[in-house]
Amino acid sequence: MAGGACGDPGPGRAFRPTDPTLLSTGSPTKDEDPSVVRAADGRLLVAWFSDRGGNPDIYLTSTADGAEWTAPVRVTTDPGGDFNPHLIQDELGVFHLTWFRWTAPYVGHIWYNRSADGRTWDPGAEVQVTTTNAVDDWVPTIARAADGTLLIYFVSEVRDPANPTSEIYVSARRPGVANWDPATALTDINSAAEHDHLPFAARIGNQIRLVWVRYDTTEPLPWDNPESDLFSATSADGLVWSAPTRVTDEPGTVFNLFPMLYPDADGVWSYLWLSGRSGAPRVFERDVAEGAPYPQGVRQRDELPAGYSHRVVATPAPGVYLAVWVQGPEGEQDIYYRFFER
């Protein structure tokens, strides 16, 4: 696939800015749920779910210069539906991938796989992380603690009969241990009266930080609710959490959705999310360390077009970033990207 409208970057000009450009080419059906990571060798990898081929599966592409993208690799091949991948690379260079798999409507479990190079994935090595019958575990996110423990956070609604709202759970796999721990609810942060949904985790220094969406029970799904806010918490081990703090605090009826965490080229971490705070849906960000009352420090990212599930990563080129997102009509969504300066 060729790069954006700005053309071939040419020698020594890799990762220069582009116009919004279609990434999920050759797919007439639905493409959603992008995840992006900058590898230690400078490659940028994008994973997402696609209905191409007649079955929902996870696909992955990469670029070493921003101009040429590799042909999409089909990472999963199960007849079930595979959705919402989250990809990271650890300090040893290993790539870790989590996603959820539907085997029937509203019956889903969390899955995991790993790759030494991010290019080759063995479906035979996939591991089912959650195994409880008749549950709908979905929208996972993965992080690696400072001691090497892998942590997958996800949403489930029917595991706790005493709490009918969506809650965030965690399953951990400790260094040298083959199996994942049974999933447990994050009781330190889950609300007993509201839904907690769409978590995104990242390790910042020696702590895990989690950001997620909280909203009332008028609608079961966060993107259907007209009002929602972002909350965040931190943990030294990924299991015991600080009290949740508000990231957004809007007057009136405003939605805040699809949060992520990412560092800029100087290592300063920000929240990034989609919001209706200025009317039409736009992308905003705010430094994680911002201590002033909301909305001070909030920045509208006009470089990112309308759509949803925006993901951003710094490229090896100074001041240049890659953004990927979803746009298009229902059933025909596509993944788009652009390189931009900031």
Image (cartoon, helix red, strand yellow):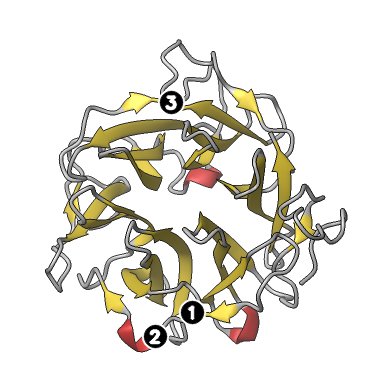
Q: Residue furthest front?
A: 12
**CB atoms of marks 1 and 2 within 8 Å:** yes
Asked whether residue 72 is in view, the answer is yes
Q: Which mark is residue 274?
A: none
* Front tag of 3 and 1: 1
38 sits left or right of 156 in the view: right
Q: Which mark is residue 75?
A: 1
Q: Which mark is residue 123?
A: 2
* Residue 101: x %, y % from top left: 39, 73
Q: Which mark is residue 247?
A: 3
**Circle 3: residue type:** Val
* Mark 2, secondary structure of its residue: helix
Crowd tier of the residue under label 1, counting other residues whose Cα lies within 10 Å: few below 14, some 14–19, many 20 or above: many
**Circle 1: residue type:** Val
Taking depth in this image into account, of 133 and 341 the one nearest to the observer is: 341
**Circle 2: residue type:** Pro
